[in-house]
Amino acid sequence: MLFWGLPWVLRLLPLVTANSYSGAQKTVAPSLSSWKALNSSVGGRLRTGVPLARPCFELADTAGATNQSECAAIRQGWSNSLFLVENFGAYMNTQWGSCQATSQSCLIHGINSSDPAPSDPPNICRQGSVPPYYIDVRDASDVQKALAFSKNTGIPLVVKNTGHDYLGRSSAPGALALWTHNLKAISYHAAFVPSGCPVSRAKPGVTMGAGVIINDAVAFAEQHNITLVLGAETSVGPSGGWVMGGGHGALANTQGLGADRVLEFKLVTPTGQLLVANECQHTDLFWALRGGGGGTFGVVLESTALAAPRLTLQVAFAAFSRNNTNATRGLYEVVAENSVSWAQQGFGGYIEPYQALYVTPTLNSTATAVTMKPLFDYVASLAPKDPGVQFFSVELPSYGAFHEAFLAGSGATVGENAAIASRLIPTANFANASSRATLVDALMETLAHVTFDLTLIATTPFNVPDDGTTSVTPAWRNSIWHAVAEGGWDGAAPRAQEKVAYSGISAAADFLRAITPGGGAYQNEADVHEPNHETSFWGPNYPRLLQIKKKYDPDNILTCWHCVGYNPADPRFACYI
Ligand SMILES: Cc1cc2nc3c(=O)[nH]c(=O)nc-3n(C[C@H](O)[C@H](O)[C@H](O)COP(=O)(O)OP(=O)(O)OC[C@H]3O[C@@H](n4cnc5c(N)ncnc54)[C@H](O)[C@@H]3O)c2cc1C
Ligand SMILES: *[C@@H]1O[C@H](CO)[C@@H](O)[C@H](O)[C@H]1NC(C)=O
Ligand SMILES: *[C@@H]1O[C@H](CO)[C@@H](O)[C@H](O)[C@H]1NC(C)=O
Ligand SMILES: *[C@@H]1O[C@H](CO)[C@@H](O)[C@H](O)[C@H]1NC(C)=O
Ligand SMILES: *[C@@H]1O[C@H](CO)[C@@H](O)[C@H](O)[C@H]1NC(C)=O
Ligand SMILES: *[C@@H]1O[C@H](CO)[C@@H](O)[C@H](O)[C@H]1NC(C)=O
Ligand SMILES: *[C@@H]1O[C@H](CO)[C@@H](O)[C@H](O)[C@H]1NC(C)=O
Ligand SMILES: *[C@@H]1O[C@H](CO)[C@@H](O)[C@H](O)[C@H]1NC(C)=O
Ligand SMILES: *[C@@H]1O[C@H](CO)[C@@H](O)[C@H](O)[C@H]1NC(C)=O
């Protein structure tokens, strides 16, 4: 309990004002006794939020202590998302634990995590954007207590699940966080009836606590001989920000986005009501939660996703050496020429500048080999000069087998400062030889301006029409790719360089924006400074989303960067640059 008396606590709990639509509400910092009261009201599960690398630093103005054995484990796990996700004080893109506006951070070296220099004196570990307090959420009451505390004290709230968010929406300076990580329950219902719906609406469903991660969900689906649509990265939260923001995955083409497949959410609304939202009750909220974004309409405790039977999958893979950069343009040409047919044939996948991975549940192996022949012929033509060429197709018995073989080991880029910018690329850009040439030129220009990577993510819900039940931008439905450009910068770089990294990646995406007028972007994997973000993320759905936001959160208690109803003056955004 010594912690309560330490001076850093006082520095980190600034006088903040609660943001509201109707004007700022002046508040004073809560007293120690009110924090203690909050702690006992949540069963002693109020914790101090400590930046992950704290044990590696001798000097710090945060809670926590120097500890060599903990530091060794942190250095080892720094680039492993499955390690990071277990730690409240960790963020996948490390700048979101820092305060970029004041250059306060607590980072070790992103590329070489064994380098002791960044944590050696005189460097000091600083709190940055890591919330100084969090509640290890176990039930609705924890959330209700936090909402009431925030309303009474003005301490801003933030919801953190896995810390994957590319827009920094799961951290905030001086905030109280709700950590949903330990809501791990998962169950299968062969005939799930959404609460309040007639029994005739029963469908197979999997109910997942908000803290479930993709690897858990894949394993669970395998055990139950069923299929779930899930994202590629092992530790993204399929019942958290992923699904509320849209949720793409390799099977989304034929099965729909995560948001398409939700049968029900259980949540606490910003005014503290525990509700169930589905097609039979609170239907406006249900629609908003299916694509309107996380951290906005309430704190989700669990969601239920439609389960499909186990699917036999056909996979095609083609690659050449990464350094054979001369071959990239040809790869783009062959995928651009064939992508509309492949999308019609149910293929989803991931295209890097040196490889393409596709998967479909709708063709047989013979038809897959035939349709992928142009891709295979292209990489085969490189083989005489490039020993790294490989290509094959294979039948796999389930999505779990596909995830295990092609995704689980691929190693996401985490543990570094990184920024992305993206664009949905519509079918019109694939219409004829001249529009495809323009597209390939734009891809090459984009690629020339990224420092990490350009990924063409063929995971749009191409064969799942917009039936008006979700609030994602309709741009998803007629798109072939979600193209993501990514750049990074050194953790020790000065602030001016960080700004250059953001504007640079945004400029890279401008080549794609220029050829997709009126198009959109995926809010969960977007430019932090997305131009016209309301239209880009939600298209014509934005006005209704804003109405629903105001109805359920009149005081804007829950808010996040570029989320529905966001106010740039909110103290939660003080660290953005
Ligand atoms: C390496 C990497 C790979 C990725 N791969 C994919 C992919 O294959 N497909 C895809 O679609 N996306 C992918 N993403 C993007 C991912 O969907 C977003 O980062 C998403 O925001 C993650 O949600 P989360 O809950 O896991 O993360 P968090 O950062 O913890 O939360 C994200 C947002 O959701 C809110 N939130 C989380 N849980 C709740 C809750 N229970 N109630 C209310 N609000 C909540 C948070 O407040 C925050 O605003 C990837 C991201 C990374 C970094
Ligand atoms: C909250 O109470 C528990 C149990 O008494 C204690 O272990 C914990 O340290 C307290 N939290 C904070 C932030 O002091
Ligand atoms: C360092 O951390 C380890 C693991 O958490 C713990 O067992 C050990 O007691 C700590 N060492 C010191 C000196 O605090
Ligand atoms: C990483 O840092 C350590 C310690 O400074 C150094 O010995 C090692 O050579 C570095 N490795 C790389 C790949 O730079
Ligand atoms: C798994 O599901 C598939 C597809 O529905 C079915 O054909 C198969 O019999 C099931 N296997 C088991 C062991 O239940
Ligand atoms: C790529 O790297 C390999 C292995 O280092 C090398 O043999 C080859 O010449 C390189 N190819 C190109 C195109 O640079
Ligand atoms: C790549 O292309 C450039 C320009 O056409 C050419 O000069 C170079 O030799 C090529 N490199 C390889 C490895 O083919
Ligand atoms: C594979 O699918 C094609 C196209 O639908 C069909 O013509 C063919 O008969 C199928 N082959 C097998 C072995 O089922
Ligand atoms: C090619 O497609 C583009 C975009 O759909 C269209 O504007 C253009 O007129 C087409 N050109 C030809 C030659 O058909």
Image (tube, helix red, strand yellow):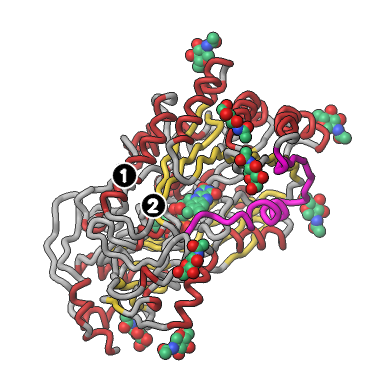
Segment tinted magenta in the rendering: 386-414
Q: Residues within 10 Å of mark 2 (few under 14, many from 20)?
A: many
Which of the two discs, 1 and 2, labels the residue nearer the N terminus?
2
Q: Nearest the camera: 282 or 507?
A: 507
Q: Residue at x 83, y 34 (%)?
A: 366
Residue 354 x, y percent position in the rendering: 61, 40
Q: Is residue 243 visible?
A: no
Residue 520 magenta: no
- Vertical side of 406 occupied by 45: above or below: below
Q: Nearest the camera: 190 or 459?
A: 459
Q: Is residue 211 visible?
A: yes
- Vertical side of 405 occupied by 74: above or below: below
Q: Residue at x 69, y 56 (%)?
A: 404
Identify the disc placed on residue 489: 2
Residue 284 x, y percent position in the rendering: 40, 45
Residue 130 x, y percent position in the rendering: 33, 66
Question: For the N terminus, which image quadrant?
Answer: bottom left
